[in-house]
Each structure stands twice: as structure tokens, then as C-alpha cells.
Amino acid sequence: MKNIKMRLLFFIGIASLFTVNISYAQVKESNNDIWLHYFGKNMITEKFSFSFEATMRYANGFSEKQQYFIRPSVDYQFTKKFMGSVGFSHYNTYSYGNPAMNKISIPENHFWIQGTFVHNSGQLKITHRLRDEFRYVGVAKAQSNGDLEIDHYDYRNRMRYMLLFNYPLIKREDATKLFALFGDEVFVNIGSNAGKTFLNQNRLIGGVGYNFDKNHQMQLSYIHQNIWNFTNTFQESNPTVRLTYVTNFDWRK
């Protein structure tokens, strides 16, 4: 219980941190988002797996495209509790909202390394995930005719830490069918080209999931997403519904 209390204090600290940071943003916007999300893990050997993640995100219902990404990775299970991953992500973030944070669609490619540590406290499953992203973000520049086009790519470094709790609600034959999830993920800008804001994003997460069998799972989550732009002149606070489909296959069999 002491560890759980410490983690709850961590959440409160993160919430206080991004609340203070909001006060410095000059423009604030809110969008009601819907995210359609897929994550698949494929065991290749006893230690190695290949994962693929993809999403399509919409702003203000389905009226505006917000963002899509694809994210393949290779994973290695070092111990029962710790897994390391190396991956690549390709994003495209659209111009959405009124006012819009981006005037045109912004592409991004980045490589990343990640460590995931999972342990249990009674029936509570606790996941810690730390990711270091080496980002190349498209930068728009006005052309001679006045139109904006992607002129070059800036290198930016970002760290992400997620703390996620998973608790079984309904079990059948010792297998979890329905479970609750709650957590927080914070994104911080680091390095020499970190921009004017320490925080890039924060996501407070809560929801439920259902295991159809050992290979297929659905999750329905509410996420409150806060985003700060690179110059810390614009901040979004977005109530978000995310529908996630998860697959887990063992190709050794």
C-alpha cells in the first residue's frame, strides 16, 4: 500500500506540474477527440518478439483528422519482468481545431529505445514504461508565393514515462476477462533543442478492457490529453475517447 500511495502522490505532482505550465501558454484550445488504436505483439522466439502499433486520431468527433502514426518495433524479454524495445515511428499531424496549432500537416519520423518493467502487488498489475525518442520533426516555412511548405526537419529529443495500473474485475477459471486500467503518461522535452517548454504532453488515462481470449483484447479508455507547442505559445486540453484493439500471437506454435 505504501508503494501505491507514493505513485498516487506522483500523479498529483505531475498534475500540479502541467497545471502550472498551462498558465504560460498564450492561446488555449480544446478539442473532443476520438482515437482508433491497434497494438499487436508477435512472439518469434522465447525472447524476441515483433510489435506493430498504428492509430488514426480524429478531433471534434470524426469531423477533423488529428493525427495518424505507424510504429513497428523489435522487443527482447531480458527477464520475466523487464523487456527492452527498439523501434521506429512515422507520424503525420494534421491542421485541426480553431485556432489550429499547426497551419499545415506536419510529418515526423523518429527512432526510439524503450524499457518496460511490469510487476504485481496482489492482484494489481503495475507497468512502468520509459521511452527515449530521437525525433525529426518537419518545420513549415513560407514560400515566395506565400504558401507554407515543409522546409526542413528539426532534431528534437523527448522522453516519455508511463505508469499504468491494471486491476481484474471479472475472472473465469483464473483468467481475467474484464479489467480496469488507470494511469498517467508524461512527455518531456530534453536536450539542446528542447524548445521553450519542459512539458510536451501529459495524458491522464482511465478505462476498462475485455479479454475475448488469450489472443484478442478490446479496451475503451478516457484520456485527458494536454499538449504544449514547441514555442510554448499554444496549449491544447483535449477530452479523448480511445478504442483499442490488442492482439497477442505466438508464432512458435
Image (spheres, rainbow, N blue to C red):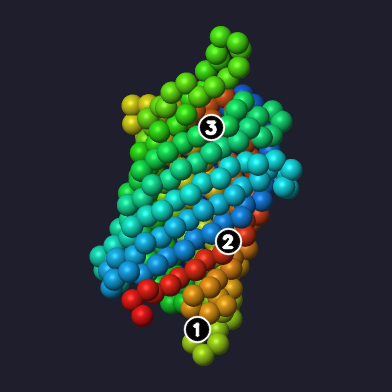
Residue 90 visible in the snapshot: yes
Is disc 1 placed on a helix, strand or loop?
strand
Q: Name the residue under label 3.
A: 106
Residue at the spot 44% in from the left edge and 51% down from the top edge: 71
Q: Distance between the residues labelled 2 and 3?
A: 24 Å
Along the horizontal axis of the image, is 50 left or right of 15?
A: left
Residue 186 lies, in percent from the top left, at 47, 46
Is disc 2 placed on a helix, strand or loop?
strand
Q: How packed is label 1: few (under 14 Cα within 10 Å), some, or many (20 or more)?
A: few
Residue 245 lies, in percent from the top left, at 56, 64
**Residue nearer the viewer, 200 or 213:** 213
Q: Is 116 rendered above or below residue 79?
A: above
Is disc 3 placed on a helix, strand or loop?
strand
Along the horizontal axis of the image, is 122 left or right of 237?
A: left
Q: Quadrant of the N terminus?
A: bottom left
Residue at the spot 33% in from the left edge and 26% down from the top edge: 192
Type of amino acid at the residue the image marks with label 1: Ala
Q: Name the residue under label 1.
A: 175
Q: Is 188 rendered above or below residue 85?
A: above
